[in-house]
């Protein structure tokens, strides 16, 4: 994905780390988290966002999105490796979505 432009509805730290890892050129989003901004700015990756929020939360607004939890404290390489090690998807419970 090197050189790509990524457009995403919501960009949290997890998405930001993957964009950095993939060496994309530009991230465009209407909504970005503070942690994503910090990661993107530190890496020098260009981005444009309309609104910045403190944290990307689950659908109920009760806790951080599971992918955000997994991304916290990790570098782009560490985060990618954590995803590559084992399946991270579990069946989606449509009645009780997490993120």
Image: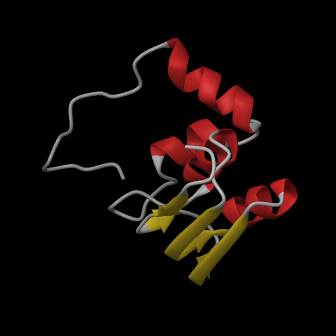
* Residue 62: % across, % down: 43, 60
Q: Residue furthest top?
A: 85
Choose between 99 and 20: the one closer to the eye: 20
Choose between 45 and 66: the one closer to the eye: 45
Choose between 44 and 17: the one closer to the eye: 44
* Residue 31: % across, % down: 51, 75
Q: Residue furthest bottom?
A: 50
Left or right: 25, with 10 as reference point: right
At 58% from the left edge and 42% from the top edge, which residue is drawn? 69
Q: Quadrant of residue 40?
A: bottom right
- The answer to whether residue 56 is above or below residue 48 is above
Q: What is the basis of the colouring in this image?
A: secondary structure
Tally of numbered tags: 0
* Residue 27: % across, % down: 59, 65
At 59% from the left edge and 79% from the top edge, which residue is drawn? 49
Figure quadrant of the N terminus: top right
Q: Quadrant of residue 33?
A: bottom right
């Amino acid at each position: 994905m090197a050189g790509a432009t990524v457009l995403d509805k919501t960009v949290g730290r997890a998405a930001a780390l993957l964009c950095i890892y993939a060496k994309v050129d530009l991230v465009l989003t209407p909504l970005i988290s503070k942690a994503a901004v910090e990661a993107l700015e530190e890496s020098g990756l260009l981005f444009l966002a309309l609104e910045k929020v403190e944290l990307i939360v689950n659908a109920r607004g009760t806790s951080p999105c599971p992918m955000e939890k997994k991304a916290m404290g990790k570098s782009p390489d560490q985060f990618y490796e954590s995803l590559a090690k084992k399946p991270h998807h579990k069946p989606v419970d449509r009645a009780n979505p997490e993120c």
